[in-house]
Structure formats: C-alpha cells, structure tokens
Image (cartoon, rainbow, N blue to C red):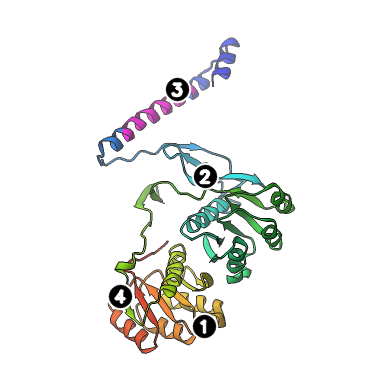
Amino acid sequence: DYPEFLRRVKEERVDLEYKKYLALKAFEFVTEYDALIAKTLKRRFQLDTERLFLSLKKGPPLRYGENPHQKGWVYINQDEKGTFLRTIKKLWGKELSYNNILDAYSAWKLLLELNSPACVIVKHNNPCGVAEGKTILEAYEKALEGDPVSAFGGIVALSEEVNPELAFELNNIFLEIVMAPSFPDEVLSILKKKKNRRLLIIPLKKGRGKLEFRWVDGDFLVEEEDSAILDRETLRIVSGELTEKLLKELVFAYKVVKHVRSNAIVVAKDKGTLGIGAGQMNRVQAVKIALENAGKKAEGAVLASDGFFPFTDSIELAHQYGIKAIIQPGGSVRDEEVINKARELNITMVLTGIRHFRH
C-alpha cells in the first residue's frame, strides 16, 4: 500500500473512500495482531478458553465454486504453516478448481495412511481405487483395475516419483490431476502432452493433528480429525482365525473405508480395492454395491465396514460372494446375531471398537 499511498499524497487524491479503505485495513492488522497474541498465550499457558480466533487471508482465485453458477474462493489460514494448500506446488495445467482442491486433499489424506508404494484414485471426494504394490506402477495398475470406469476424470495420488513407464500409462486415461512427490524432467515432457491435466508436487508428511470445521448457517461444528489407529492388542477376533497376512489385508481395507462417505463398505484383496460402496442410506445397499462392483473377484477377499451391521443380511450377502473375512467396529444391539451368523458361515470377523463415519 505504501507506493499507492505516496502517489495519492503527491497527487492530492487522498479522498474519503481511500481513507475508509486504509482505516479498515489498519483495524484488520491490529485485530489480527491482537488475536495472534491471544492464541500464542493460550498455547504457551496451555489454557482452554471459550473463544477461537481464525486468521484467514484470501488466496488464489477459483474459476467458480462447486458448480459453475457459484462463486468460489480460497482463504489461507495464517496460523498454520504446513497446510496442504501451502505445501503443494503446481507444475503444469490450469488453476485448481474448488472441486479439484477437495478431491486432491481427500486423496492426499488417504495416501498418507498407506504403505509405499501406494496409489489413490479419487472421484467426487470418494476413493474409487486404492492399492499398495511392490512398485509404484503396480500400485497404480491395481488401483485403476479396482474401478476403471469411475477413475475416468478422477484424481491420482502417488506415493513415489513418477517414472517414464508409469507416465505413459497415466496418459492412457483422462485424469484431472496427477499428484506425486516428484516428477523428473523426462516424465514432465510425457505428461504435459495432456494440456488439460494438472500436475502437483505433494508432501508425504502431515503436520500435527488439526481441527475440522463444518459451516452450519453461520456457526461452526468443530471436531478433532479422525486420526484413530488400529491397535492389534485391542482387536476382538469373534469368529474364525486371524493370520498375520489376513490381518494386513483387513487393516488395509479399514484404512480405506475410513475415507469413504458413510454408509461405506470396501471389498479388497491383495491390498487393492475391488469394490467400494459409498454414501448409502442403509448399510446393506452399500454392501450390495461394493460386492457387485467386485463381482467374481470378491471370492476370497475381505470386507470392511465403517459402522456396525444392524442385521445379518449383509453377512449373508458377503458369504454369497465368497468373502472370507470382515472387519467392522461392532456396537450393534444385534452384535451377537451378526457374530453367530459369521461363525455359521465360516467367515472370520474382527471387531475394532472404532467407528469411522464420514459425512
């Protein structure tokens, strides 16, 4: 503002409207500084008060909001230095859209929970293909195979540097965004052939646990992010036997289902998703969708549920498709019926005690 201010003073153009602008900006700076002092003392003294201060600054422009008729903006939190939007770097492509940011963030959060090499494909804020592999190419191919139809126009997040072989595979499908920790020059020359695709460099480390906010007509719901981790010692094996290999398969599926809109079901095998049922109003419908998407591949696979099973119908349906193990939080008044049905059908069942609803 100083060059503009000096120019106006020199030209005697410091009118009332400009004074209003400067006054408002001055009060914003003072307010932000006072809030910073309060937040620093709160953190230093480890005291909890009834007020929460946010310092937000308008960031890069968005073409529009969730839909073209809606305006959209990004506001950057000045109190957090290592956020997703502050640490990503766009190497190629158009500006990120509102939906791009939501989907990219969703893919990144899930990717950080997986063992590398790993790949996450997201569409409409839900994972549609997720896999771990021996190589990053294998992880991508397994993730894509999980739902190649939904992957079209989606976002791919990769845990390792993109190599030329993978780059050529990525060019075989339309993708909005490809995200990875690095892109060598030879890979960029391949991927840049798709002019409408964005290429993002992403960090593979997340900052400290954060709060999550939901706007409710001018007010906010605030909660801790869902960072619960499964503990082998607290798992309850209520049906069948649990081998170490089977446990790893179940843990993988449970990591994925945590990031799917509720009611959520994930069918997986060999650390790759085969079918995902997302956002259904009843659980058995989510089970049907996931199993139908998996088809015959569901034979010998595992199934993860973000919430408990209220009835035995989902267990019976899983058995029809050959599911060998189920992981779920438990907690239903009909848990005993559900467990007995799993025992009757020789399905291994593990209760976690941790629900993963996502709305």
The residues bearing labels 2 and 1 have C-alpha atoms spaced at a distance of: 41 Å
Q: Is residue 123 visible?
A: no
- Estimate the x, y position of residue 138 in percent, counting from the top left: 61, 66
- The magenta span reads 22-40
Q: Is residue 150 above or below residue 33?
A: below
Q: In terms of secondary structure, where does tag 1 sit?
A: loop
Q: In terms of secondary structure, where does tag 4 sit?
A: loop
Q: In terms of secondary structure, where does tag 2 sit?
A: helix
Tell me, for residue 23, which label it has, or none: 3
Residue 7 occupies which quadrant of the picture? top right
What residue did someone put label 4 on?
332
Tell me, for residue 299, which label it has, or none: 1
The residues bearing labels 3 and 2 have C-alpha atoms spaced at a distance of: 30 Å
Q: Residue 30 lies in magenta, yes or no?
A: yes
What residue did someone put label 2 on?
85
The residues bearing labels 3 and 4 have C-alpha atoms spaced at a distance of: 59 Å
The residues bearing labels 2 and 4 have C-alpha atoms spaced at a distance of: 39 Å
Of mark 4 and mark 1, the one earlier in the sequence is 1
Disc 1 versus disc 3: nearer the observer: 1
Dominant SS in magenta = helix
User: 260 or 249: nearer the eye?
Assistant: 249
Q: Amino acid at mark 3?
A: Ala
Q: Is residue 285 above or below residue 258?
A: below
Q: Is residue 34 above or below residue 128?
A: above
- The reply to whether dot 3 and dot 4 touch (C-beta < 8 Å) is no
